[in-house]
Image (tube, rainbow, N blue to C red):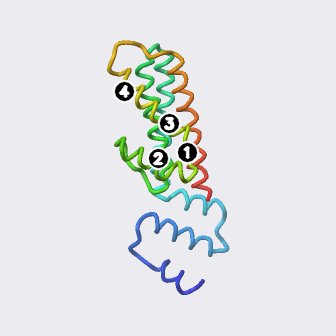
Amino acid sequence: MNDQRRAVISQEELPAQAAAAVNVLRLVEDPDVGVSDLAAAIGADPVLAARRDLLALAERKRAGGGALLTAGQPAEALGLFRDAMVLACRALDPRGDPGPEPAALLAAVHDRLVPGGLLGEAQAGALARAGEAARAFAAVTVAPPEPLVAAVAADAAALVACARMGVANVSIA
């Protein structure tokens, strides 16, 4: 092990993400450590755990939207599908959760997620459409058109699946 690496590993006061990375480095150097030990150490990263939590919440929101749609409440379903898409995008951001505020989220989507290849332009547009549809139909008594709700539901499922793959790739890398 070189001196520079030894100096980093010996640090006591490291941020949580750096501490998790240093722990993984220590384990990699140990010939007696198995793959399951490495996987557990990688999984202990608090940033990755937060991303997984956001993704799990996105999946629950998407499922809840499907249940509301089945129950004949399409306007309410739109809101949950939008929430699922927002949470999926928050889980994908490599710089950490930009938070729920729409302007910060859309800035992260167009500044990092799309240019970084984590989301496509079509998915970014679908997120914006879902937000507008959810806001519009929450404020009126008119039911949203069935094709619109079906499209938003499909977009939410696709975006959550994309985030699932992105978060899985981070935990393997």
Residue with the mark numbered 2: 109
Residue with the mark numbered 1: 119
Which residue is at 52% across, 32% downward? 156
- Specify few, some or many for label 4: CA neighbours under 10 Å numbering under 14, 14-19, or 20 or more: some
Q: Quick one: which residue is furthest to the left in this view?
A: 139
Q: Quick one: which residue is furthest to the bottom in this view?
A: 3
Q: Amino acid at mark 1?
A: Leu
Residue 72: % across, % down: 46, 13
Q: In the picture shown, does residue 168 fall above or below 133?
A: below
Whether residues under marks 2 and 4 lie with C-beta atoms below 8 angstroms apart, the answer is no
Q: In the picture shown, does residue 25 fall above or below 41?
A: below
Query: Which of 2 and 133 lies nearest the eye of the viewer?
Result: 133
Q: Quadrant of residue 170?
A: bottom right
Whether residues under marks 3 and 2 lie with C-beta atoms below 8 angstroms apart, the answer is no
Residue 39: % across, % down: 60, 59
Q: Amino acid at mark 2?
A: Val
- Specify few, some or many for label 3: CA neighbours under 10 Å numbering under 14, 14-19, or 20 or more: few
Q: Amino acid at mark 4?
A: Arg
Distance of label 1 from label 4 (alpha carbons)? 23 Å
Is 131 placed left or right of 172 in the picture? left
Camera-side mark, 4 or 3 = 3
Camera-side mark, 3 or 1 = 3
Which residue is at 59% across, 70% downward? 27
Q: Earlier in the sequence, mark 3 or mark 2?
A: 2
Q: Earlier in the sequence, mark 1 or mark 4?
A: 1
Residue with the mark numbered 4: 135
Residue 123: % across, % down: 54, 38
Q: Which mark is residue 149?
A: none
